[in-house]
Image (spheres, helix red, strand yellow):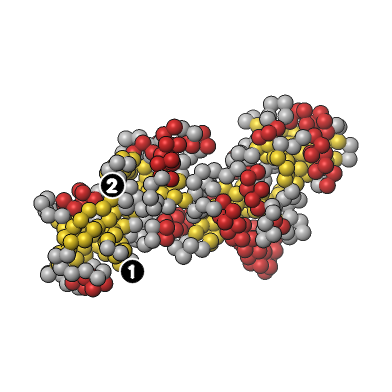
Amino acid sequence: METIRVRLRFLSHPHVCGIVLPAQLFQKLDLRPRQRITVMLGKKEIVATVLQDQRNPDSNIVKVTSLMRTELGIPHGGLISLKREGDALRIGPSIGIVTTGLRRDPRMPIGQRTSFFHKLLQAQEGKGVFYFIFSPHDVDWNNHRVNAWFLRRTKSGGYVWRRLTTAIPDVVYDRIPSRSAEKHEAVKAFKYKLANYPHIPVFNQGFFNKWRIHQLLYPNPEVNQHIPETYTSPNLQTLRNLLRKYPIVYLKPKNGSLGYGIIKVTRQAKGYDVSYHTGSGNVKRFFSKLSSLYQHVFRTRRISSYLAQQGIPLLTFHGRPFDFRVHLHKNQLNEWVVSCTAAKVAGSGSVTTHVRTGGTVIPGDDLLRHLFGKQHAMVMDRVKEASIRLASAIEQAKAMELGELGLDIGIDTRGHVWMFEANSKPGRSIFKHARLKQADKESRKLLVDYSCYLANF
């Protein structure tokens, strides 16, 4: 049955568990006055009496009694959706973002990450959803409730954080912030409970392992043309063989992020250059023997935690190599769409294009227009088309719900498209660029849209 947008209000009636509907909604929802029906919010349900609003038969205002609000844990009124599903009437959708590090400070409930989640929750505007953040500690599994932080509009037009008790949500978006946080006992216990709780879709669970993604995609004829040759736990002979085939080879941590730990090895006429970034800056050294270079690199690094990957001769902008961060989302039709394509131009002497090592973010269209003129749209379409095929292949191979992905995509000097990395928890630093503010807004709205799809609203 169709989803119906309504305005939800509350009646001060502590003794009756009821929901008051205008006459025009009775037929749409296949209801009759004074009918008793199961009403659901997220994973909480009660039996309520359906009453008819005699005064406003044609409005879209729905009222619930204070008893029903308390029993169900309805957090607030306003624009929301109703849906008849079988023998039940659903109110929602209810979307929860799970993370760690929450505290009871109404000014900064997630500490330094408060602004990040403030922006995420702003995407609820006009969407008609209950949208909140919570931590694994906040769930009462026995009573199907969760203590959560909501971002609410004030009468003056600003925002305020409110901590409210509500139902366990229809759908959960996993924003556990790090691999180390995932190892906490509370997080592991929460994920175990969630996996065994009926009918709660969870999307973007966990972090990707670079080698595992390579193993999944390299045998796939649909996308393997975009995957560089890669080996795990590279010994000296593996590195030597790769450098015979390719002038540049990258050594990358399997579980790295933000470019940390990446090492660039370049074949020269009489030896090899090695480049990497440390806390104090970019380092570049020359070795006449590959064995000496190998010993230097893995003197303090575990070989088993590294990959060796074919280096790609990237296109350059003002003499500096660049790649793209392609931010993809599933929409409300469960289709992959590209919300943003930002070019990352390497900093002077940097091994990677990451901003933290001096890289610069430029809107992808701007950079391609500068390089290709009227052909820029065709090149961008190739990048987007490859990215969507790669996202679909990752989702299919991982056999898990994915609502967003960040892909690091490069174009080589022959115009071929390559994927270097896939991120299940993509950062949003590219959206700080003034020209990408609209893409930022679109990206956050798509997270809500896909959540609505998973919640069947």
Secondary structure beneath disc 2? strand
- Residue 23 visible in image: yes
Residue 59: horizontal and vertical position, in percent?
21, 70
Please name the amino acid that badge 1 sits on.
Answer: Met
Quadrant placement of the C terminus: bottom left
Residue at 48% across / 62% down in the picture? 334
Q: What residue type is disc 2 on? A: Thr
Front residue of 96/49: it is 49
Q: In which quarter of the image is residue 27?
A: bottom left
Residue at x-position 89% and y-position 40%: 269
Closer to the observer: label 1 or label 2?
1
Q: Nearer the viewer, residue 116 or 424?
A: 424
- Where in the figure is residue 311, as x and y percent of width and height? 75, 46
Residue 349 vs 315, above or below: the answer is above
Task: Point out the residue furthest to the right here.
Answer: 270
Q: Do the residues under discs 1 and 2 have CB atoms within 8 angstroms?
A: no
At mark 1, the secondary structure is loop
Front position in the image: 295 or 196:
196
Q: Mark 2 points at which residue?
A: 166
Q: Name the residue under label 1.
A: 1
Which quarter of the rendering shows the N terminus?
bottom left
Give the image location of residue 240, x and y in percent: 82, 39
Q: Residue drawn 33% across and 47% down?
A: 168
- At x 81%, y 28%, the residue is 292
- Left or right? Give the position of 308 relative to 434: right
Q: Distance between the residues labelled 1 and 2?
A: 25 Å
Could you say where residue 388 lies in the image, as x and y percent from the top left? 59, 60
